Amino acid sequence: MAQSRIMVIDDEKIVGDMAKMSLEQEGYAVETFLSAEPALKRLEEERFDVVVTDYKMKGIDGMEVLRTVRSRHPGTQVIMITAFANLDAAIEALRRDVHDFFPKPVKIKELKASIKRALEK
Amino acid sequence: MKIEKKLILSNIINGAFIILIGFFAFQNLNLVLTKLRFVQIADDLNASFLEMRILDKNYFLYRDKNALPAIQEKIGNAMNTIQGVQEDIIRAIGKTDLRKLETLLNQYSDIVLEAQAGSPTDTQLEARLRSAGKALREYSASITHLERQRVNSIILESKRILILSFWVILVAALFLGHFISQKIVRSLREIEKLARSISAGNFNRIDGFRSRDELGSVITAINSMSEELSNREEQIIQSKKLASLGILTAGVAHEITNPLNNISMIAQTYEEMYDHLPDRQRRELIGKVDAETERIRKIVKNLLDFSKPKDANPKEADINTVVQKTLTLVQNMIDVQNIETVVRLEEGLPRLFIDEHQVQQVLVNLVTNAVQAMSAGGKLFISSRAGKGGNSVEITVKDTGKGIQPEFLPHIFDPFFSTKGEGGTGLGLSVSYGIIKNHRGDIRVESKPGVGTTFTVELPISKNHKDL
């Protein structure tokens, strides 16, 4: 079975770093981005199984990432994490077919479990 | 002295003067009347004396036997008239003239009696009688003439005095009116100036205006009101600050979430991968935890600094630092509204002598307003630059929000004026205005409905604000 590819987008560098360390431990190939623009560009080049994205970011935000991924890369699942845990954002994300929605601080074990479920889809 | 008392006193003086003039005119009129009555009597006597002289002439010329008794009758009548002159007339013209007339009449009468005993051909007697008659008539004519002259001069004098009094009263009234209105107008202007400056948020006193009249009391009352307002303003500043704190807290809570999440993720990874981590990476991760903790500590400190009530404490400060500290407080509020922030801070600006926290409060108010005006998202421009003329520094907070209706613009700095409905206290901008005015600065607004609003805060580069 081919190695699953995970993309993490968050303007907080530590989020990407820690997720990378932890997820690589599980055998995933992980790429991290500090903003959405280069990440979306990268998605055009390479297929990723799961995109973990922050909601609130400068420039293109997580909701926009979700929208783009759902329309251009339907096989890729999106998990959204946010420091602004508000209901409206969560509902909108669900409507746009988000795989999962995590408020910060994120429990890495739950994130891993969620990624695992996403890969089984 | 109170203005009311001054007015009453001046009215009393004017009134007394008018009564005095009236009394004087009345006295003169009475005197004239009395004198005229005397002139009438003197005229009658005069005519009677003339008749006597015609009769005595007839006696000597035509030997008219009836002439002398007729003269005697007329003398009797004239004597009665003279003695019957009333007391008030005697008082008015003096006794001397009447006594002299009486004496002359008696002399004439004596010669008439002699003539009755003598002959109409006695030329010596004729000459004496003619001479006495002439003296009598001339004297009575002279009295009449003199009294007429006196009456004339009394009337002329009265006229002069009345005209003079008219001018005196007119000038006094004009002067008094002018003086009082000047005093009232001047004080009202002072009061107006003070009221304007109070409504502009400057709680100054009117000094050097010491009068114990009503205006003095009004000014004392306004001064104490001004002081009271000044005290209240501090309370309002504090309560407004607590209100903005409510808005800020939500944003700050979000802002803390990010470093908190970082710490949490580091801790989870650290625990999970402990056995696989080389020492160097362990130390690195712990260092990151420390840095993230520091991030939280700064956010909390900022919030605490902002919330603490403080007396105005002006210090030298770099305005760009103040702007940046403010941004850390409001950044999350801005972010959640999908607003893009453009910050342009000019470097090398002169340091300002300001109360950092008060200015920060103004900026928080302005940014909060801008964010609330852009509920559908937009751009927020925050910039600093040297002011025109080089004596000040300008900070602008510009939004692309819904703008302010032109008819509201003149009122937006008024206390309790709000366009936000239930959401606004109407104090944010008035408190900001007061703070900037206390810094001898200026705060201006430009706005176009549908385009956006720009607030410009201008702070002077002078040191030593005595009244900060």
Image (cartoon, helix red, strand yellow):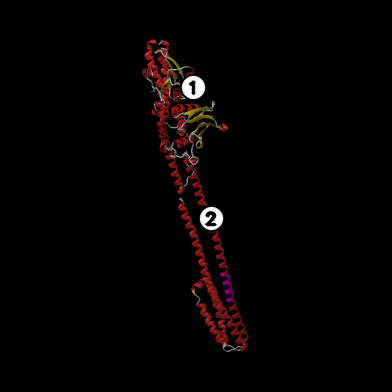
Rendering coords of residue B209 (x, y %): 48, 44
Q: Position of residue B292 (x, y in %)?
A: 42, 20
Q: Main secondary structure of the magenta part?
A: helix
Which mark, residue B272? none
Tell me, yes or no, if residue B223 can be seen here: yes
Task: Please name the amino acid that badge 2 sits on.
Answer: Leu
Which of B310/B345 is in front?
Answer: B345
Of residues B41 and B431, the one nearer the viewer is B431
User: Mark 2 falls within which chain?
Assistant: B
Whether tag 2 and tag 1 are in contact, CB under 8 A, the answer is: no
Q: Is residue B85 above or below residue A59?
A: below
Q: Does B421 appear above or below B108?
A: above
Kindly report the distance in space between the C-alpha atoms of the residues bearing marks 2 and 1: 86 Å
> As rendered, which of B396 and B278 lies closer to the eye?
B278
Side of A25 relative to B460 (left or right)? left
Element under label 2? Answer: helix
* Numbered badge on residue A37: 1
State the residue position of label 2: B174
Q: Amino acid at mark 1?
A: Glu
* Residues drawn in magenta: B140-151
In the displayed structure, B259 sits above or below B359; it is above
